[in-house]
């Protein structure tokens, strides 16, 4: 069962973008020009429609408390676009909300459980996945508390956990902390693994058994699509396709098509042809875009 902002679905058949943002506010870091808010909803809906023409069947919005999560807005977008949208429970990390500093593990756990089972931010819109992360530099004690709370909430609800890494080597701390709290690594998706310098570094993380997000397709300011395609090809040649998730992590207004970006369709229009040129098969693409997201989004209970 997959929990969307408009209700539970037995399954979603077809490609799923598992790491996106339809509404997000990171102005505290990057200024007001990057915000994806209510004023951008029409553009977001149009861009999703363009991706749906390539076959997109669902999208996961990973904005959480502290980063502009807007559950009613997500429901509006889902209903108007005719596309299932999955919302995330959890707390942002850069900056970490005061509530994380002030609250014991049990309170944070119970908030995330409530967001999955009852609704987020006073609504009846339930989250279908849990998102947490760590910022650059030394990992703060509050991150340890939040990761443990997220693991407890995952075990209680069956919702998987997605983590944001600000550096590839943080993945090991993420996995260590979540596994010590009782999580199965198969229920963990470690994001931003496209930052791995080569396949050796990616394999080191993959050995732990989690899913790995190659999730900044189209964000060429960080890494070119060609470099990411090479990494995915190498991952498939190493037999890792059952652990790879592909997405574009649209998290700022200038990545929408109106502003010259490739938006939510980048994986389909730009990246798939690159993968096929490199010998990645249609079956492998199907595993990464359909089967892996379906597996991580299915509630375990």
Image (cartoon, grey):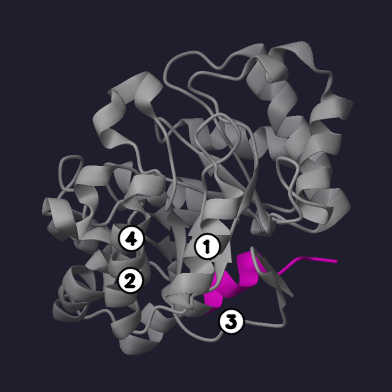
Q: Residue 42's mark?
A: 4
In the rendered structure, which disc, 4 or 1, sits on the residue that comes first in sequence?
Answer: 4
Sequence-wise, the earlier of marks 2 and 3 is 3
Do residues under tags 4 and 3 come within 8 Å of each other at their CB atoms?
no
Question: On the picture, is 128 further left or further right than 35?
Answer: right
The circle on residue 237 is 2
Secondary structure of the residue carrying tag 2 is: helix
Q: First in sequence: mark 1 or mark 3? A: 3
Q: Is residue 125 above or below residue 254?
A: below
Q: Distance between the residues labelled 4 and 3?
A: 24 Å
* Local crowd size for mark 4, using a 10 Å CA cut-off: few (<14), some (14–19), many (≥20): few
Task: Provide the residue span drawn in magenta.
Answer: 291-301
Q: Main secondary structure of the magenta part?
A: helix
**C-alpha gap between disc 4 and disc 2:** 40 Å
Q: Which of the marked residues, 4 or 2, is nearer the chain's N terminus?
A: 4
The earlier-in-sequence mark between 2 and 1 is: 1
Say which quarter of the image contains residue 142.
Answer: top right
Mark-to-mark CA distance, 2 and 3: 27 Å
- Tell me the CA gap for discs 4 and 1: 10 Å
- Residue 12 badge: 3
Q: Position of residue 48 (x, y in %)?
A: 35, 69
Callout 1: few (<14), some (14-19), or many (20+) C-alpha neighbours within 10 Å?
Answer: some
Q: Residue 76 carries which label?
A: 1
Image quadrant containing the C terminus: bottom right
């Amino acid at each position: 069962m997959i929990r969307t902002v408009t209700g539970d679905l037995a399954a979603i058949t077809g490609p799923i973008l598992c790491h996106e943002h339809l509404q997000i506010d990171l102005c505290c870091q990057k200024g007001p020009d990057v915000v994806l808010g209510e004023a951008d909803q029409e553009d977001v809906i149009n861009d999703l429609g363009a991706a749906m023409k390539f076959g997109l069947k669902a999208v996961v919005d990973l904005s959480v408390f502290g980063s502009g999560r807007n559950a009613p807005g997500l429901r509006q977008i889902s209903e108007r676009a005719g596309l299932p949208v999955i919302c995330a429970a959890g707390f942002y990390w850069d900056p970490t909300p005061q509530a994380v500093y002030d609250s014991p593990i049990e309170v944070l756990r119970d908030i995330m459980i409530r967001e999955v089972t009852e609704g987020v931010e006073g609504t009846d819109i339930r989250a279908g996945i849990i998102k947490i992360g760590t910022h650059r530099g030394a990992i703060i004690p509050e991150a340890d508390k939040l990761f443990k709370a997220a693991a407890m909430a995952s075990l209680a609800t069956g919702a998987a956990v997605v983590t944001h890494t600000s550096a590839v080597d943080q993945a090991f701390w993420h996995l260590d902390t979540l596994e010590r709290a009782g999580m199965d690594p198969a229920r963990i998706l470690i994001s931003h693994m496209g930052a791995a310098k080569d396949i050796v570094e990616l394999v080191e993380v993959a050995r732990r058994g989690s899913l790995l997000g190659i999730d900044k397709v189209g964000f060429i300011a960080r890494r070119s699509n060609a470099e990411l395609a090479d990494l995915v090809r190498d991952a498939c040649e190493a037999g890792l396709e059952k652990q790879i998730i592909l997405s574009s992590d649209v998290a700022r207004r200038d990545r929408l098509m109106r502003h010259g970006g490739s938006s939510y369709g980048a994986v389909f229009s730009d990246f798939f042809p690159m993968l096929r040129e490199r010998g990645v098969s249609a079956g492998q693409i199907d595993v990464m875009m359909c089967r892996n997201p379906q597996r991580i989004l299915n509630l375990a209970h």
